[in-house]
């Protein structure tokens, strides 16, 4: 029997490990499939797969890292940051995850700051719109700037009743800022408003618990659990409120401390712990013991400072959490008692200065700074010469973020006692915090340090001041001095991290500026200077070694083919890339080195015989080597593969008609059109959009044309700008006389080397003077379609589907309609559409007028671009042809109308001129100015476009 049991046990183990192996294999397949989906840009599908992978492997950091990369690519930076942090917790030394977290955090923070500026601009336009204050508060919450977040939430709540979700977020901010007393009545009111929301009852329970109102807290937690049994947050809070898991013991060991009696000859335990920590600041066990001893003698603020130091490494430690809660509870109880004691004293003796000072102190400890400043101000009204109380008023004003008032009080104090180091320190700190008159602040702080070289606050403030001035060396010196005084100070740690990050960023900026300088010299054909700077850049270990190709190009620019080719060979040896190999072969061709060019292209053609480009250049190499028969043979083969290739036909034309019997090039091209163009757009919310360039169109046959365009443009707002280069190719097909099909593809390349794809296709049917109908699709960068200052640095792809038609009916009746359907996949897949309908009549050969209806509606309103809900207008429009003959066509027109929902009068005026200078050369221009309403405020814009058409 025992033997059978052993066999059963062994078999169970085999089955278990087999299942585990299968599970691991399966989860490994999920990861591989997710990586494959990422390669194709299918980040949504990859996220679904990685969700399953992470569920199966919660301790694997790679899953979080990959999912974070997917979220980053989708612009969901908040989720990306969360995943990278989760991965970094599992693998703290992983440099890749750390770099991903740094990069994504910077992008997210930049986006949040842009969002804040955008909503502040909206507030300047309409200060009563509550949602702008809410969005700013949420953004500061994400940035971890809790006090700023609280201020903006306060402004929001003044203007609008919040939802339960927003009150939950607000309570988190209040808890972070330790503003418990402020939050308790707010949570109470919203519990009454939303009595079925267990989250509000639970949060109200915690706030009352922290204020020592245990009975109310118990009732609140029980209410939450009645609504949702087993709600973990409420269950934990109920246990805390009932005292489970905590043992409170208060021993009266404070008598000698409170009465100031002299100590005995022995070393007190608190002094002993401070001494031990001075020699070993990393001894967390001793620091925990020190906190407990400080709490025993009611030195809660010192205990709080020590807990803040411990929080750096112990924030998730249960012992730390328990001690933090215990300290807060005891602080609240003790300070409440002391406040009642001194308020009672003042009620019997209103001018008692000692009671005022003590009461102000305990008000500040309880974060009741409004009450402490009011107390001091009232006292100073009767005793304006009391400098000590005035200094307390300045301190407390600073603590409640009323820096201007604090600064004014400090200036009064310094007039009376200019050498007082306490006044100098506070005034210097205020100047640094406000970034106001830093030279004066530096003078005051240096005076403090000269009197007290160990003054840590003065030294840290000087370090912060030099960081603001970007004097990184001086800042580092001050931080080194501060480290020698107290290397565990949290402010010191934060400043050191800021300095390290700023130095890295500065080094990166300097390095980038160096390579850009080299590129500029290469572009301007200053080859020797470019080589020198590229070499300087590449000597830096942080440089991008792929820039070596550009160094090779600089050598070739100089004519030093030997050194240039050495670099190409080394790059290919380290990491072979076919395109780089092809580039190397092209260099021989461009340098007219027929022997090496022919050798390289023969080698590449044998390696990749189906590559069109390689074989094309092989033919060019034969041409360069005067091997015309071989060249003709290569080009003829290519023409069979691509019969419509104009490039191949051109090369065969160079060789003459032999071998291409029956084809004539005398009628090629059917036509050639060159069109320089420029466009400028400007509006009153800060957007300036301009572009200039050239468009080329070549008639291949009487029904087929090819075109291309190249533009250089600029997007600019009040706070940022971006340049871009637009390159696009077009194919135009005309058939059945009235139909034409146009397809175009290209890229917009912005200054940060990000490419935005452009694709367009349109079908048009037109019969002159009777009708014109078109349908089209365009996909391009949202900034080039939706015209918003908030898209200047934001790359989103936007799509537009359009249907446009107009009809000149009998009796001079005119009908037209335009319908546009928009999608912005990168912005929560937002969708919108607009519709314009016009009906009118010609009242004279040169004048017509009529009625217009316009409607615009989007699924979601975005802060990045105008996306209204249910916007409509009714207008009267007119067109007046001032001049029309064989040389000039000049038309002006416009409209005026009403926007009912906004009670606003819209207007638009335009002028359009076309002038024929010669039969083959025409210039046209259009200027449009309009005024309407967006986001409930007036909006105006001006657009100008000019084009020239030169046909050959």
Image (cartoon, helix red, strand yellow):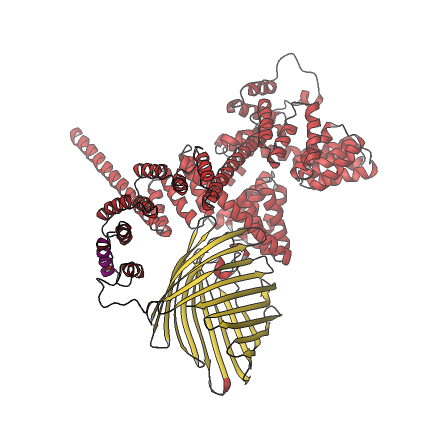
Picture mark count: 0
Residue 633 on the magenta segment: yes
Q: Looking at this view, is 939 or 158 the one in front?
A: 939
Q: Which residue is rendered at x = 72% and y = 34% of the image?
A: 359
Image coordinates of residue 594 in percent, x first then y, are: 28, 46
**Which residue is outermost to the bottom?**
811
Above/below status of 302 relative to 718: above
Q: Quadrant of the C terminus?
A: bottom left
Q: Quadrant of residue 287?
A: top right
In the image shown, does 416 or 225 lie closer to the viewer? 416
Query: What residue is at 44 percent from the left and 66 percent from the top?
Result: 821
Q: Would residue 133 appear left or right of 554 to someone viewing this image?
A: right
State the image quarter where residue 327 is shown: top right
Instruction: Say left or right for 112 vs 674.
Output: right
Near-viewer residue (303 or 760): 760
Picture layout, residue 652 above or below residue 82? below
For the stretch drawn in magenta, the main secondary structure is helix
Instruction: Give the x, y percent position of residue 441.
Output: 69, 34
Up/down of 736 relative to 446, above or below: below
Among all residues in the image, which is located at the extreme top? 265
| Residue 340 in sight here | no
Residue 636 lies in the magenta stretch: yes
The residue under the point 44% across, 45% down is 80
- Indicate the position of residue 111 as horizontal and vertical percent values: 52, 48
Image-quadrant location for residue 176: top right
Segment colored magenta:
630-640
Outermost residue on the front side: it is 626
Q: At which x and y percent is residue 664?
A: 27, 68
Q: Foreground residue, 295 or 94?
A: 94
- The image quadrant where one finds the N terminus is top left
């Amino acid at each position: 029997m025992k033997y059978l049991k052993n066999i059963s046990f062994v078999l169970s183990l085999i089955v278990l490990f087999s299942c585990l192996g299968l599970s691991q294999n399966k989860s490994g397949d999920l990861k591989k499939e997710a990586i494959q989906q990422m390669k194709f840009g299918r980040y949504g599908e990859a996220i679904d797969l990685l969700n399953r992978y992470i569920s199966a492997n919660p301790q694997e950091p790679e899953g979080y890292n990959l999912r974070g990369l997917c979220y980053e690519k989708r612009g969901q930076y908040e989720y990306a940051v969360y995943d990278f942090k989760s991965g970094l917790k599992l693998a703290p030394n992983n440099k890749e995850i750390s770099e991903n977290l740094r990069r994504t955090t910077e992008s997210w923070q930049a986006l949040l700051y842009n969002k804040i500026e955008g909503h502040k601009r909206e507030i300047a336009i309409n200060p009563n719109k509550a949602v702008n204050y809410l969005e700013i508060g949420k953004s500061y919450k994400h940035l971890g700037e809790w006090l700023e977040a609280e201020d903006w939430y306060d402004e929001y709540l003044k203007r609008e009743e919040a939802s339960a979700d927003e009150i939950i977020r607000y309570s988190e901010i209040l808890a972070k800022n330790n503003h418990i007393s402020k939050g308790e009545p707010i949570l109470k009111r919203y519990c009454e408003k939303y009595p079925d929301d267990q989250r509000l009852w639970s949060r109200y329970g915690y706030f009352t618990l922290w204020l020592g109102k245990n009975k109310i807290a118990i009732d609140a937690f029980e209410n939450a659990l009645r609504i949702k049994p087993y709600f973990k947050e409420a269950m934990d809070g109920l246990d805390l409120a009932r005292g489970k898991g905590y043992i409170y013991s208060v021993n009266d060991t404070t008598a000698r401390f409170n009465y100031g009696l002299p100590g005995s000859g022995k070393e007190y335990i608190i002094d002993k712990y401070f001494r031990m920590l001075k020699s070993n600041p990393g001894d967390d066990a001793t620091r925990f013991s020190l906190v407990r001893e400080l709490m025993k003698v009611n030195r809660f603020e010192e205990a709080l400072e020590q807990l803040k130091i411990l929080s750096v490494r112990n924030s998730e430690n249960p012992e730390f959490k328990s001690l933090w809660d215990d300290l807060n509870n005891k602080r609240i109880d003790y300070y409440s008692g002391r406040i009642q004691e001194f308020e009672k004293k003042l009620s019997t003796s209103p001018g008692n200065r000692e009671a005022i000072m003590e009461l102000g102190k305990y008000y500040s400890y309880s974060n009741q700074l409004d009450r402490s400043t009011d107390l001091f101000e009232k006292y100073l009204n009767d005793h304006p010469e009391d400098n000590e109380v005035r200094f307390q008023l300045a301190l407390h004003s600073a603590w409640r973020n009323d820096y201007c008032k604090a600064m004014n009080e400090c200036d009064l104090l310094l007039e009376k006692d200019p050498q007082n180091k306490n006044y100098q320190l506070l005034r210097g700190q205020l100047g640094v915090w406000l970034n106001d008159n830093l030279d004066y602040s530096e003078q005051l702080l240096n005076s403090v340090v000269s009197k007290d070289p160990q003054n840590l606050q003065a030294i840290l403030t000087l370090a912060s001041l030099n960081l603001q001035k970007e004097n990184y060396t001086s800042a580092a010196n001050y931080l080194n001095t501060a480290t020698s005084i107290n290397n565990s100070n949290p402010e010191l740690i934060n400043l050191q991290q800021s300095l390290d990050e700023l130095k890295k960023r500065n080094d990166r900026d300097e390095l980038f500026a160096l390579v850009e300088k080299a590129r500029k010299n290469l572009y301007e054909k200053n080859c020797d200077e470019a080589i020198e700077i590229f070499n300087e850049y590449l000597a830096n270990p942080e440089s991008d070694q792929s820039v070596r190709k550009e160094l090779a190009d600089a050598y070739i620019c100089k004519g030093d083919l030997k050194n240039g080719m050495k670099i190409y060979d080394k790059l290919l040896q380290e990491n072979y890339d076919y395109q780089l190999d092809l580039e190397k072969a092209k260099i021989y061709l461009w340098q007219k080195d027929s022997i090496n060019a022919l050798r390289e292209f023969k080698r590449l053609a044998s390696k990749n015989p189906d590559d069109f480009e390689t074989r094309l250049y092989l033919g060019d190499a034969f041409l360069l080597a005067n091997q015309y028969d071989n060249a003709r043979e290569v080009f003829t083969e290519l023409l069979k593969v691509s019969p419509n290739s104009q490039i191949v036909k051109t090369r065969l034309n160079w060789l003459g008609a032999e071998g291409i019997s029956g084809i004539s090039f005398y009628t090629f091209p059917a036509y050639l059109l060159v069109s320089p163009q420029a466009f400028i757009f400007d509006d009153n919310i800060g957007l300036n959009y301009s572009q200039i360039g050239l468009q080329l169109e070549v008639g291949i046959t009487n029904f087929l044309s090819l075109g291309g365009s190249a533009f250089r443009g600029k997007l600019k707002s009040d706070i940022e700008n971006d340049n871009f280069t637009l390159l696009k190719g077009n194919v135009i097909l005309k058939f059945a006389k009235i139909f034409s099909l146009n397809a175009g593809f290209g890229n917009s390349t912005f200054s940060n080397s990000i490419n935005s794809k452009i694709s367009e296709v349109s079908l048009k049917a037109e019969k002159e003077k009777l009708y014109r109908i078109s349908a089209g699709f365009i996909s391009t960068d949202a900034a080039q379609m939706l015209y918003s200052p908030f898209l200047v640095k934001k790359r989103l792809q936007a799509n537009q589907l359009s249907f446009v038609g107009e009809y000149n009916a009998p009796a001079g009746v005119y009908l037209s309609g335009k319908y546009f359907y928009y999608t912005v996949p990168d912005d929560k897949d937002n969708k919108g559409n607009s519709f314009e309908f016009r009906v009118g009549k010609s009242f004279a050969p040169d004048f017509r007028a009529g009625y217009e209806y316009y409607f615009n509606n989007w699924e979601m309103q975005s802060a990045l671009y105008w996306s209204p809900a249910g916007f409509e207008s009714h207008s009267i429009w007119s067109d007046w042809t001032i001049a029309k003959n064989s040389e000039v066509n000049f038309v002006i027109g416009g409209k005026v109308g009403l926007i009912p929902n906004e009670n606003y009068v819209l207007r638009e005026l335009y002028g359009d001129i076309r002038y024929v200078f010669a039969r083959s050369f025409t210039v046209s221009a259009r200027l449009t100015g309009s005024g309407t309403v967006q986001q409930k405020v007036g909006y105006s814009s001006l657009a100008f476009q000019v084009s020239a058409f030169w046909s050959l």
